[in-house]
Image (cartoon, rainbow, N blue to C red):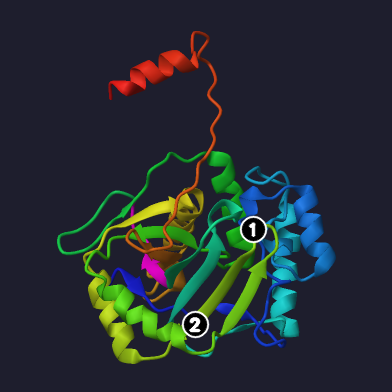
Amino acid sequence: MALIHPIRPLIYQAKDNHDISGLIAPPYDVLDEDAKAALLSKNGRNFVAVDLPHLPAKTVGPDEAYEQAGNRFRQWLDDGVMGLYPKRQFFVYRQTFQLLGHGARYQRMGLFAGVAVQRLGESKPGHGGIYPHEETFSGPKEDRLKLMRTTRSQLSPIFGLYSDADQQIRQLLDPVTNSQPLLVGRTDHDDVLHEVWAVSDAHVSRQLVCLFETKDVFIADGHHRYNTAVNYQQELIQASPDISSDHPANDCLFVLVAFEAPGMQLGATHRVFGGMPDFTFPSFCKEADGL
């Protein structure tokens, strides 16, 4: 079975030069109540209304919150706010940004694709695997699973990394961005330009499938959502063991970015450590210096 597959996504029906700036939102788990309210004050159909039905993020809310999100999602589909894309394709996604909001501008290009759901850290001969770098917790997974059950959709992509040292995949994707994008948007909080193109060339799509066949994918962000996709697939299989091989739940939505991409810039992150009464920063530096 191929590692990646084209997808048939639900997309906003943009009417203003393909601009959906008022409808997109940052990842749900970086938002608080004020940030969510600010997005909805600009446009009541901003996707945060579905993707973050309960606050604080990553905690489990009452069933009613998820049911309301699912009802809202289905109403948008009924009203034509969102619609199913005409056919299954890969999509190129490009972000243009400044690192930490200043200095040079970078461009990071990724590929929207369905990645075959499999257990983390496992791979078969001649087939790439999916690898994590952090542990997960039950609360966030239960939150996302309740939302997936009521929407029956994967609402945001996993951020996955792969190696493209010989730039074969980049050479396939670069020409796609020479045309007008299908969708564009800009997020105010970080001043990032987002652009999406459909990969319409069937030959390019076949090459992408072949090139990714043996590549390993490393999850940069989205461990809880990936595990949720695995759990949701298993629920469906238990309920109906003869689930078809082309069922959408057999794939997980990813945006795949090459390690070697010019826009793969990393900023500093901050963590708080606890439970270490004798910890001091000088002692930490001393120990780290010997690693």
Q: What residue type is labelled 1?
A: Asp
Dot 1 alpha-carbon crowd within 10 angstroms: few under 14, some 14 to 19, many 20 or more: few
Residue at 37% from the left image edge and 66% from the top image edge = 115
Q: Is residue 41 left or right of residue 277?
A: right
The magenta span reads: 113-119
Instruction: Answer yes or no: is residue 1 visible.
Output: no
Residue 146, position in %: x, y?
62, 54
N-terminal of the two: label 1 or label 2?
1
Image quadrant holding the C terminus, namely: top left
> Label 1 belongs to which residue?
190
User: Residue furthest toward the top?
Assistant: 278
- 248, 50: nearer the viewer: 50
**Alpha carbons under labels 1 and 2: distance apart:** 22 Å
Quarter of image, res 213: bottom left
Disc 2 residue crowd, few under 14, some 14–19, many 20+, Cα 10 Å: many
Does residue 246 lie above or below 182 as drawn? above
Name the residue located 67 percent from the left edge and 80 percent from the top edge: 19
In this view, the residue in front, 157 or 100, is 100
Q: Quadrant of the N terminus?
A: bottom left
Q: Residue furthest right?
A: 41
Indicate yes or no whether the magenta region holds residue 228.
Answer: no
Q: Is residue 168 left or right of residue 202?
A: left
Residues 262 and 173: in front is 262
Q: Would you place residue 141 above or below residue 69 in this image?
A: above
